[in-house]
Image (cartoon, grey):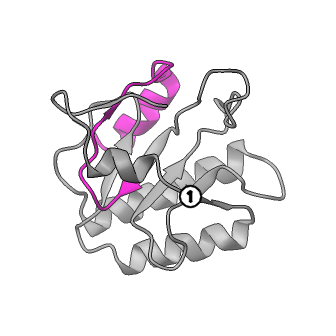
Amino acid sequence: MIALVQHGTTSDYAARFQGGFTGILYWHQLDALWKRLRASGDGHWYVYAVGAAPPEQPVTAAELERFITEIDHLLRTEHDFDYCGVVYVDAIESPEMVKIYDPNHLGSSCGSSGLRVLPGWVVSRLPPVDLKATVPLPRSRRRWWQAIFPG
């Protein structure tokens, strides 16, 4: 079980985070997911880089668009396979939370090594809580993140 903390209490975010997710196996499924997020980019999405401070405000539609464009490029460039397999969504048709795993830091995402790998990024309708990262955010990813969301 992953420790989720928000001022010492768990939250709806924690429950949703630990709930059931469906893997996005194919790139065309990822394209469809991005299309759904863009269509609902109404300023009610939080974009969280696990290992950084959780955002307090949702992103704007323009910020969501930029994140989707950048993360899609990162995934297709650094996960050079004919399948996706590193993105998971709670509900394909009406997503509320999306977990995106860093292709360079996958470890054993099934947990068979005893160490559960957290996603690199989470996009959600709910305000995120601090996910106690098992590994610090790598400097290259921190710079990548700060280029999208400076300051």
Q: Is residue 10 above or below residue 67?
A: above
- Give the quadrant of residue 114: top right
**Which of the pair 105/10 is nearer the observer?**
10
Instruction: Using residue 89 as the reference point, say whether residue 145 is left or right of it.
Output: left
**Which of the pair 80/122 is nearer the observer?**
122
Q: Position of residue 31 (x, y in %)?
A: 61, 72
Instruction: Using residue 127 as the reference point, say whether residue 51 is left or right of it.
Output: right
Q: How many marks?
A: 1
Q: Residue at x 62, y 67 (%)?
A: 30
Q: Residue furthest right?
A: 82
- As helix, strand or loop, the secondary structure at mark 1 comes to loop
- Give the quadrant of residue 45: bottom left
The reply to whether the magenta stretch includes residue 130 is yes
Q: Residue at x 28, y 45 (%)?
A: 128
**Which of the pair 78/135 is nearer the observer?**
135
- Give the quadrant of residue 55: top left
In the image, the segment drawn in magenta is 123-151
Q: Position of residue 92 (x, y in %)?
A: 55, 73
- Badge 1 crowding class, 10 Å Cα cut-off, few under 14, some 14 to 19, many 20 or more, is some
Q: Residue at x 72, y 21 (%)?
A: 113
Q: Is residue 135 above or below residue 43?
A: above
The reply to whether the magenta stretch includes residue 40 is no
Q: Position of residue 81 (x, y in %)?
A: 82, 51
Check disc 1 and give the amino acid type: Phe
Image quarter of the C terminus: top left
Q: Is residue 26 above or below residue 78?
A: below
Residue that badge 1 annotates:
21
Q: Residue at x 24, y 66 (%)?
A: 44
Q: Position of residue 102 (x, y in %)?
A: 59, 38
